[in-house]
Amino acid sequence: MATDMQKLIGTSEEDDDEDVEMDVKEEDDEEDDGEKRICSSLMVGDDGGMVSSGSNNNRFEQHQVQEQVGTPGGGRRCRPVEEKERTKLRERHRRAITARILAGLRRHGNYNLRVRADINDVIAALATEAGWVVLPDGTTFPSRSQGIKAAGGGSTAITSSSSHMVSQQTPSTFIRGVSCGLRSLPEYNACRMKGVFLPNSPTYEASPNARCQSSSLIGDAVEQSAGHPLISSSVDAVDGMQIVDVAPKIPERDFAGSTYIPVYVMLPLGVINMKCELVDPDGLLKQLRLLKSVNVDGVMVDCWWGIVEAHSPQEYNWNGYRGLFQMVHELKLKLQVVLSFHECGGNVGDDVCIPLPHWVAEIGRSNPDIFFTDREGRRNPECLSWGVDKERVLRGRTGLEVYFDYMRSFRVEFNDFFEDGVITTIEVGLGPCGELRFPSCPVKHGWRYPGIGEFQCYDQYLLKNLRKAAEARGHSFWARGPDNAGSYSSRPHETGFFCDGGDYDGYYGRFFLNWYSQVLVDHGDRVLYLAKLAFEGTRIVAKLSGIHWWYKTASHAAELTAGYYNPCNRDGYAAIMAMLKKHSASLNFTSAGFHMLDQREDFANSLSDPEAVVWQVTNAARDNSVEVVSENAHPFLDRVGYNKILDSAKPLADPDGRYLSSFIFHRLSPLLLERLNFMEFERFVKRMHGEAVHDLQV
């Protein structure tokens, strides 16, 4: 038998085999016990008495009953030995595959899996990597959704990562991940499950009659909700029943008559292909008409450097964008344009791959120092290093000249759209993801949330800049990066530089961090100066990233590696806001949606404080009279999320009435345009515009 199994599943570690044998034996014992319970239950007499096993007649009757169990209509039969052996082989094969998956993930995927991890750990790790939230009890939900809490503060399972958990909870019907076998009806009410309405009633027992009552209640809920204006047109049929989504009743503010805040919708990343052609113009036109029908003010679109100037320097192809802009113009919508000087792909939310121009990649192969570099010498081709802003390494041009030529070409090409007022805003890409920050947290180099990231200043051009700064300070030996700052996924307390009382607050640490953050401010200053020249009379926007993890520590390590010199004893955003004010630029701060971050299992362990980050950045902007634009950090389609956005866009307690200057919804998708979701979005747009809604829940 051992030889046959080795042929079937291959060799593995001895300890893993022993664990497999023990697990299979335990499962077989459970199955045998189950069979005994079934057989014994069939021996119960019609009057409820147990059949005695003391006489030969009774043993004969028991044998007949066991034979009846094996018949098609007699229920579950007792399995023969051969079938048990086949089950063991299948189980060993499955567990051997699981062991190989675990080994591969640990070796190649940098997953933090325990040595004795099981398939539940694998599923949880993969789900977390895909952007889902997996709680310790198995509760799983998309990161964009609201956490579903029990009345007592605990979590109630929605989707289990273990089929064993499902089998324990499911009697006969499993409706959209909601078990019908909960012990009591108040547990249903505490769950507040989406799509299920159950009124208060006495204690619910998991019996066939109770299940029938539950089914009738759900059916009644469907009939009652047939005329509800917020019920989706699509229904889910499960075991003959149709369950619909019912919007919960949530206390809401009345924004009727409040300040008008324009709402823009971000277009998909791949709306223009690599040949600079408009993808699916007919489908896009239909979607834009739907947006226009709910009075959306306009759309936002990325103009990718890697598409427009893809093949040769100063050869620009704007054809696809002209067709898109004309379509938007004909629908009387407005445009916000992002000049994206970074690559697309590899970051959260990226569903297409758009690299930097080919000719830039060729230069990078011979001179990789044009890209940001970490302490280990790993290059990040996501965008150009700010060290080449004034270095003529790009076919005779500096980085600033490349950016300015691109911006000037755009201004000349679409002059008519500027003159007609179609293009209202230009957001200038200033770094990775278009944000003014160092690419300190690249997933491709092993960063995992909530790691502190690494400093990105080890290309020859930034190191030369650092040497000049150290010599000007009179300490030439400071011309180096910290050697005790940990790695991408380190925690602050694990490093000598970021720990409490660490080197970050020493003489050298303060010198280095001041230089590092000044490089960031100087880059933004130079590029925005050129943008103001190219787009005079048009609003210019710069984007910052909301780095909230480790905010409750003294060093704010994740912010420091990103270039925001913002420890607990220093305001790291004041200098950035002063620079934006200098160029009359607005701030796009990706903060909306941070309220959902507390659903992450690792949120508490990262000492994160997103609300404090939002408060500090927005107040620093408003203290410098910088307008604030916002977009949602995470996708959402529910009323709770919209209400959170409204509360932050129009704060009730602000005595000066400082509201957002505009809001950008991230992003247009078929899911948004589904009937129920689109009705909620239309309602949100009305409230952002200060219009009254008819179904306000107060």
Image (cartoon, rainbow, N blue to C red):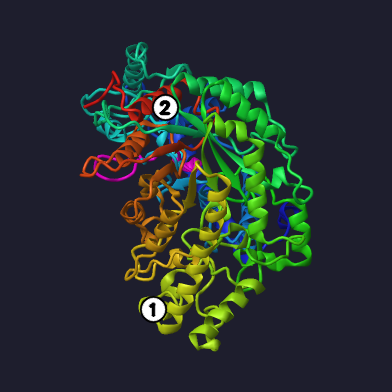
**Magenta residues (range):** 148-165
The reply to whether residue 72 is visible in this rendering is no
Q: Secondary structure at mark 2?
A: helix
Q: Residue 548, image x and y in percent? A: 40, 57
Question: Which residue is located at x 41 percent, y 22 percent?
Answer: 679
Question: Which residue is located at x 45 percent, y 24 percent?
Answer: 678
Asked if the residues shown at circle 2 and circle 1 are in contact, with their CB atoms under 8 angstroms apart, the answer is no
Q: State the residue in front, 411 or 590.
A: 411
Q: Is residue 673 left or right of residue 359?
A: left
Q: Residue 503, image x and y in percent? A: 42, 81
Examine the rendered structure and indicate whether residue 20 appears above or below residue 73. below
Check disc 2 and give the amino acid type: Phe
Check disc 1 and give the amino acid type: Asp
Quadrant in which residue 381 is drawn = bottom right
Q: Secondary structure at mark 1?
A: helix
Quadrant in which residue 143 is drawn = top left
Residue at the disc numbered 1: 505
Q: Is residue 405 magenta?
A: no
Q: Is residue 447 left or right of residue 491?
A: right
Marks 2 and 1 sit apart, C-alpha to C-alpha, by 47 Å
Q: Residue 105, image x and y in percent? A: 62, 57
Question: Which residue is located at x 60 percent, y 47 percent?
Answer: 340
Label 2 crowd bin: few (<14), some (14–19), many (20+), radius 10 Å: many
Looking at the rendering, in which quadrant would you find the N terminus? bottom right
Is tag 2's residue or tag 1's residue first in the polypeptide sequence?
Answer: 1
Residue at the disc numbered 2: 681
Examine the rendered structure and indicate whether residue 676 appears above or below residue 87. above
Q: State the residue in front, 578 or 452.
A: 578
